[in-house]
Amino acid sequence: MSSGVAWPSLATGGGISSGLEGGYTAWVREVLRAVAAEPRAAVLFDSTIKEPTELLARVVGEAFRDGITDRYESTFAGGNRYVAAAVAERYGVEADQVICTTGATSAMAMAVSAFVKPGDHVIVEAPAFDLLPALAHEAQAKVTPLPRRAPDFAIDVEALSAMVRRDTRLIMLTQVHNPSGAVLDVETLRAIGEIAAKVGARVLIDEVYADFADEGSAVRVSEVFVSAGSLTKVQGLFALKCGWAVGSAANIATIQAANPQGDQGVSKLAHAIGALVLENMAPFEAHWRGVLSAARPVLGAHAQRMIDDGLILGAPPPYGCMYFPQVVGVDDTLELASWLWTTEQIVVAPGEFFGQPGHVRIGFGGDAAALDDGLGRLHDALLRRRRPG
């Protein structure tokens, strides 16, 4: 059945080196417009836990039921002090080692502006969420990709060591890895930190998914790490736009010196609610664990059937809400994604947006029943594509 809604034209443009314009973020914006007009749409690309609206409404109601919560305070320059204190407690650092931001994206941008000058060398994991290389290119850095190869998407620390140069100023990573869901263990993180320290580089690590793995923050492993985090992905609280950067006192001071105004987009209201959430995370942790306990078996069963039928390669990762399988016999996953939308109104994220054509990213942080329906339709569509008759 052909959809009457056109596939977003941005799917054939952009790319991970095209700068902050276009790329995955712009593609998502256009996809969401198409999905809103198509009642049969099966959305399999989202990488966020579904929003806990009832929990959020409860926190907001309690915050203003008997007047205005004392967490509602100015965020000028320094950010909300209660957010900073709660984040510091979670990371095991002092409050002055935290910068409050509108999200991990803003935190990373501030860090890059502090540590990278035009012409500096930056190493970026690949495949990668396209924001990472885009920020490095925006800073006019010389960018070298650090391969994280399928199927385990691990980091070869010897290869990284050979790649580091005297002018290397930053290594950019994600934990849990976006798009594959792979996790870097403490031993690997420690080795990466030692390699960076030899040339005076920092390691900027996007840890928006780190809570999934319970490994603890990289900032506890080495002082060369600067972590970016938020309530957006694991907790599904994208409406709050509550994020942060965490690092050693020296690294945070460097970021603040490069960004003396702080993040001026921080909302006084949103961060007041964010503080209350951070101070009582148990209900929100129970929410995402409940979502994944229902969704993960559905994903696992469908993935195994597609693997058995020779349609995809790569087992689902043990952590997170993302799956990045290789599609057998397909090199152009932009074209595949367009075909899936046109024929079945299924949306998957093409691997091209992460620098890995031939793979697709599937998100499973939403409703288990909708996931079951969408993955079943994806399986049938891939079978038909392989055997058109």
Image (cartoon, helix red, strand yellow):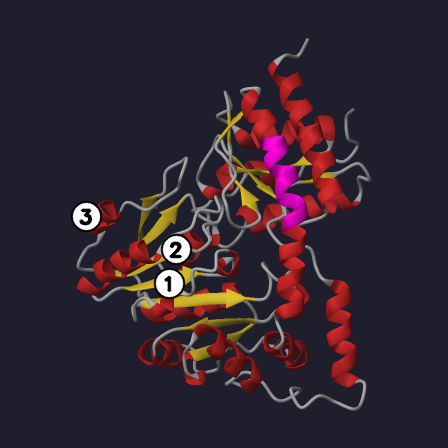
Q: Secondary structure at mark 2?
A: strand
Residue closest to the eye, 85 or 22: 85
Could you tell me if residue 311 is visible in this image? no
Label 1 crowd (10 A; few <14 / some 14-19 / many >=20) = many
In the rendered view, does 166 fall on the left or right side of 294? left
Residue 281: image quadrant is bottom right
Q: Which mark is residue 173?
A: 2
Report whether 269 appears left or right of 115. right
Instruction: Tell me the residue at 43%/78% (across/down).
Output: 259
Q: In this orientation, which residue lies closer to the viewer: 284 or 71?
A: 284
Residues marked 2 and 1 touching at CB (< 8 Å)? yes
Residue occupied by mark 3: 162
Query: Measuring 55% from the left and 47% from the top, which residue is drawn there?
Result: 24
Q: Quadrant of the N terminus?
A: top right
- What residue does disc 1 label? 204
Mark 2 to mark 1 CA distance (whole Å) = 6 Å
- Residue 84 versus residue 365 in the image, above or below: below
Segment colored magenta: 293-303
Look at the numbered disc 3 and give the secondary structure of its residue: helix
How far apart are the alpha carbons under marks 1 and 3? 19 Å
Within-10-Å neighbours for mark 2: few <14, some 14–19, many 20+: many
Which amino acid, by three-letter code, is at mark 3?
Ala
Mark 3 vs mark 2, CA separation in Å: 17 Å
Q: Earlier in the sequence, mark 3 or mark 2?
A: 3
* Tag 1 secondary structure: strand
Disc 1 marks a residue whose amino acid type is: Leu
